Image (spheres, rainbow, N blue to C red):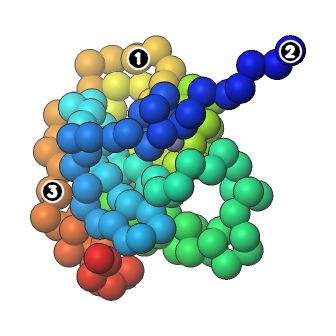
């Protein structure tokens, strides 16, 4: 007999998130600044409800989420001036819909590999400008709630 799946409200780290540095949020999704010293300005766009795949969302919700992802990309580009943006959605470890918006620099620890690859060097240190990111997100998405 198959066991019931664990309640995501209890077991999912994005459902029971606390201590996130939320830059912008609405009733549907939020943009958080990831605390990652090697990748300053790294943001995550998280759908608030526990949903696994993009195609679990209705068409309008998919567009809404991608508008937030693209706004996060624009904010990170404007504030961090990266050499490249990496957008990724994996969810293999945390199957709760979220997108990674990662500023990449040719001198960061693992460039040109993914940030999850073994480092090639000691990465250059940068600081994230959280208030600049908030300002740009509001410009593109409105004030949020
Ligand atoms: Zn969840």
| Residue at 33% from the left image edge and 17% from the top image edge | 121
Horizontal arrangement in the rendering, residue 111 relative to residue 67 (left or right):
left
Q: Earlier in the sequence, mark 1 or mark 2?
A: 2
The residue that label 2 is drawn on is 1
Q: Is mark 2 within 8 Å of ligand 1?
A: no
Percent x, y for residue 2? Answer: 82, 19
Give the image location of residue 84, x and y in percent. 45, 51
Secondary structure state at the residue bearing disc 1:
loop
Residue on which disc 3 sits: 129
Would you name the residue on which mark 1 appears?
A: 120
Determine the CA span between mark 2 and mark 3: 52 Å
N-term mark: 2 or 3: 2
Q: Does residue 70 appear anywhere in the picture?
A: no
Residue 101: give x, y in percent of width and height: 44, 51
* Closer to viewer: mark 1 or mark 2: 2
Task: Note whether ligand 1 is within 8 Å of mark 3.
Answer: no
Q: Quadrant of the C terminus?
A: bottom left
Mark 1 to mark 2: distance in Å?
Answer: 48 Å
Question: Circle 3 sits in a helix, a strand or a loop, which is it?
Answer: loop
- Say what secondary structure mark 2 lies in: loop
In-image side of 10 versus 91 (left or right): left
The residue positioned 14% from the left and 45% from the top of the image is 127
x, y (%) of residue 114? 52, 31
């Amino acid at each position: 007999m198959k066991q019931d799946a664990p309640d995501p409200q209890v077991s999912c780290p994005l459902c029971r998130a606390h201590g996130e540095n939320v830059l912008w949020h609405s009733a549907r999704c939020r943009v958080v600044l990831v605390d990652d010293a090697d990748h300053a300005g790294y943001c995550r766009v998280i759908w608030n409800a526990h949903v696994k795949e993009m195609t679990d969302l209705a068409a309008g919700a998919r567009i809404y989420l991608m508008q937030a992802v693209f706004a996060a990309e624009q904010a990170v580009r404007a504030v961090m001036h990266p050499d490249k943006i990496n957008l990724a959605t994996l969810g293999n470890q945390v199957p709760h819909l979220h997108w990674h918006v990662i500023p990449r620099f040719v001198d960061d620890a693992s460039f040109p590999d993914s940030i999850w690859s073994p480092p090639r060097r000691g990465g250059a240190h940068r600081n994230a400008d959280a208030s600049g990111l908030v300002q740009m997100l509001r410009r593109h998405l409105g004030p949020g709630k």
